[in-house]
Image: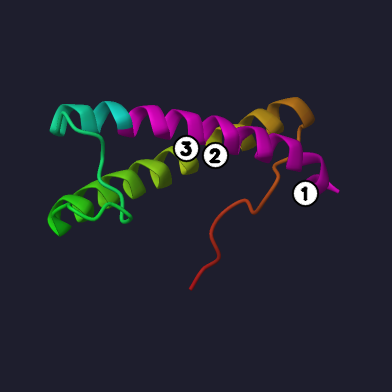
Amino acid sequence: MKKVAFTPFSVGAGLIAGMIARKTFAAIWGAIDETEPPKPEHRDVQVGKIVLAVAIEGTIFALVKGLVDHGSRHAFLRLTGSWPGDERPEPE
């Protein structure tokens, strides 16, 4: 039941995380280069530049998603009194 109740929080948090990550990446890329970030579909672009852009973008998206997801779980805990997920990682 907790999982179903947490779904709207998760969807909303994902949308917020995406917006934050996009703006953060744009700001960081703007400090690196004055042109738009290269995309794999661009023909005339250096591979090293694509690697840099994709690595930065992926790192930012993963970091922001993880932090926002964890924060939304804490908000859910404060509102409902129950944690939507495991308490701690499983031992190996």
Q: Which mark is residue 67?
A: 3
Q: Residue at position x 32%, y 34% from top?
A: 25
Prevailing SS of the magenta stretch:
helix
Q: Find disc 2 in the rendering and name its residue.
A: 70
Proximity of marks 3 and 2: CB atoms separated by less than 8 Å: yes
The magenta stretch spans which residues?
Answer: 1-25
Residue 11: quadrant of the picture = top right
Which x, y percent locates residue 59? Answer: 33, 47
The residue nearer to you, when weighing 52 against 3, is 52
Q: Find disc 1 in the rendering and name its residue.
A: 3
User: The disc labelled 1 sits on which kind of residue?
Assistant: Lys
Relative side of 5 to 76, left or right:
right
Which x, y percent locates residue 40? Answer: 31, 56
Total residue callouts:
3
Mark 2, residues whose alpha carbon is within 10 Å: few (<14), some, or many (≥20)? Answer: some
Name of the residue lying farthest toward the bottom:
92
Which x, y percent locates residue 7? Answer: 75, 43
User: The disc labelled 2 sits on which kind of residue?
Assistant: His
